[in-house]
Image: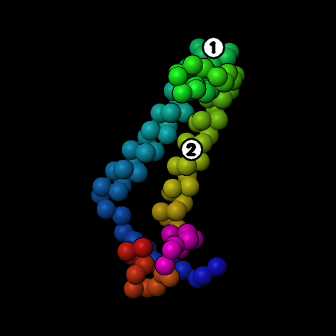
Amino acid sequence: MRKQPKIKIPKSTSILILDLLALSLCVFYVVYTALSYANLPDKIPIHYDLSGEVDGIGGKSVILLLVGIGLRLFLMHRVGNEYPHTCNYAVQVTEDNAVAQ
């Protein structure tokens, strides 16, 4: 693994707003799921075929898997943004091109 330079990139206002929006949506997603979980039917469709017919049925706990996937994607994005030197890049990252990469 190549050694990447560690630099601190200042965040613009628009990036901070988008980060706050993404965090707010994650919180809303968790709260909404928790509040509506009791009202869900015991079995819900989890897959549809090309004609729109249900061909997969699962328990309502599948919804929790979707929440977990969304939260994990958010956290992975945040870690990648906070620690860019831990990510893989297609080109050699140097001090000169680190901000652009």
Q: Magenta stretch?
A: 84-91
Residue 4: % across, % down? 54, 80
Circle 1: element type: loop
Can you tell which mark lies on residue 14?
A: none
Residue 92: % across, % down? 50, 82
The residue at the point 60 percent across, 42 percent down is 69
Of 21 and 47, the residue lying toward us? 47
Of 95 and 48, the residue lying toward us? 48
Of 40 and 56, the residue lying toward us? 56
Q: CA distance from mark 2 to mark 1?
A: 24 Å
The amino acid type, in three-letter code, at marker 2 is: Leu
Residue 10: % across, % down? 36, 69
**Where does label 2 land, which residue?**
71
The residue at the point 47 percent across, 33 percent down is 28
Q: Which mark is nearer the camera, 2 or 1?
A: 1
Say if 67 sits above or below 15 in the image. above
Query: Nearer the N terminus, badge 2 or badge 1?
Result: 1
Circle 2: element type: helix
**Where does label 1 land, which residue?**
41
Marks 2 & 1, CB-CB < 8 Å contact: no
Residue 20 in view, yes or no: yes
The residue at the point 54 percent across, 27 percent down is 50
The magenta stretch spans residue 46: no
